[in-house]
Amino acid sequence: MRGKAVSLFAMFALLCGAAPAQDYAPVKPGHELQFPRDHGSHPQFRTEWWYLTGWVKDKDGRDLGIQITFFRNRPRVAEDNPSKFAPRQLLFAHAALADAKAGKLQHDQRAARAGFGLAEAKEGATEVVLDDWSLRQTASGYRADIAAREFTYALEFRTTQPVLLQGERGLSRKGPLAAQASYYYSQPQLAVSGSITVKGETRAVSGTAWLDHEWSSEYLAAEAAGWDWVGLNLADGGALMAFRMRDTQGGTLWAGGTLRAADGRVKSLAPDEVQFEPVRRWRSPRTQTEYPVALRVRAGELRFELEPLMDDQELDARASTGTIYWEGAVSAKSGGKRLGFGYLELTGYWRRLQL
C-alpha cells in the first residue's frame, strides 16, 4: 500500500470535503458516550482518529518517543456504487519514532480505501488495520504492530485508569459555534511494554503512553489556521490535555482542555483558562517552516514550560493526509521540577490546515 498513498490522496483530497456537514451524523449536546461500543469506528461521521503517543526507555535508559495515528474518513462519494472497489471509507495512518541520537524524526505513512480485509476500521471495539499496520483492543488495553520503513513496533498498552471524557462529558468544543465540536475521550497513563526494532536491532522498551479517540463531522472554523495541542501524563499520576485553535493572524480563536488530578477529580478548562506562549522557535531545514517547539503553558492553575526531546520532530504527511506538521515528544517542567511527559502537536504552521 505504500505505492498507493500518493494516488489515493490526489484522487480524493477534493472529494473528501465535497459533502456538507448535514450529510453526516452530527455531534449532539447531551449525547452520552457508551463503552465498549464507542471504542470502535463511527462510519456515519466524516472524520475519526485514534492517536497513540508515549515516552519509553530501552534497557540502556535511552528515551524514545513513539507516535501511531490511524485516521478514518467518509468522503461521501460513490456510496450508491455497488462495486466493492467504491471508496466509501478511506483510511490513513502515520507512525513516527523520536530518538535524539538519530537527530531527526523517523516516520512513515499509509493510505488505502477500506475493504477486502486489508484496510478496515471495525465498529464496537478498537480494531484498525492498514495492511501490516494495526491497532487492536485487547483484554488489558491495546496492541500496536507497525512495520515502517525504518523501524518496527510490537507494543502493548495496558490501561491503568478509567476513560477520561474530554470537554463536557465527551463533547469537545473546537470553536465559537456550538456545531464546531467533536466527540472525544482519552486513555492516559497507559503502561507500555514490548519492543522496537531499528536497523535489525530489537530493543525491549517500557514506559507510559496516551491514547486519544476523536470523531466529528464538522470542518474547522473558517477563521482557524491550525492548533497547538498537548497531552501530558503527569508525574503524580494525573493527566492534562490542553489546546488552542489559532486564527490566521496567530491569535487564539478558541481554547480548552481537561485536567484529571491524581485523586481522580476532573476539571474541564474554559477557553480563558488556557494559554500557549512561545519561548523558543525552530526552523525546519527542509520546509523553512518555523514552529514554537518550546512553550510556556497555562492550564487552569498549572503553569509550566514544554521542552522537546529534540527539535526536529517535523512530520511530512503530504503523501497521505496532505499536510506537514510538528508532532513530538516533550517534557513539562515547573519551578525546576519535572511535571510530566507527553506529546505536543503543532499544525497549520506550514500552511493553513484543511480538514
Image: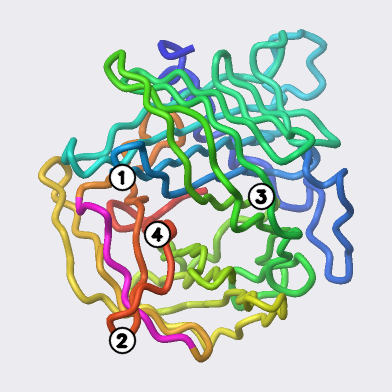
Residue type beneath disc 2? Gly
User: Residue 203 location in percent, x, y?
Assistant: 37, 27
User: Residue 25 location in percent, x, y?
Assistant: 82, 49
The residue mark sitting in front, 1 or 3, is: 1
Out of 148 and 228, give the one closest to the viewer. Answer: 148
Closer to the N terminus: mark 1 or mark 3?
Answer: 1
User: Residue 93 location in percent, x, y?
Assistant: 51, 31
Location of residue 297 with respect to 315 vertically, above or below: below
Closer to the N terminus: mark 3 or mark 2?
Answer: 3
Badge 3 crowding class, 10 Å Cα cut-off, few under 14, some 14 to 19, many 20 or more, is many
Badge 4 crowding class, 10 Å Cα cut-off, few under 14, some 14 to 19, many 20 or more, is many
Residue ID for mark 1: 61
Residue ID for mark 3: 213
| Circles 1 and 4 in contact, beta carbons < 8 Å | no
Q: Is residue 68 magenta?
A: no
Residue type beneath disc 4? Leu
Residue ID for mark 2: 335
Residue ID for mark 4: 344
Q: Residue at x 71, y 8 (%)?
A: 116
Out of 307 and 255, give the one closest to the viewer. Answer: 307
The residue mark sitting in front, 3 or 2, is: 2
| Circles 3 and 2 in contact, beta carbons < 8 Å | no
Q: Residue at x 59, y 37 (%)?
A: 71
Looking at the rendered structure, the secondary structure element under dot 4 is strand
| Circles 2 and 4 in contact, beta carbons < 8 Å | no
Query: From which residue to which does the magenta span run?
Result: 302-311
Residue type beneath disc 1? Gly
Location of residue 247 with respect to 183 vertically, above or below: below
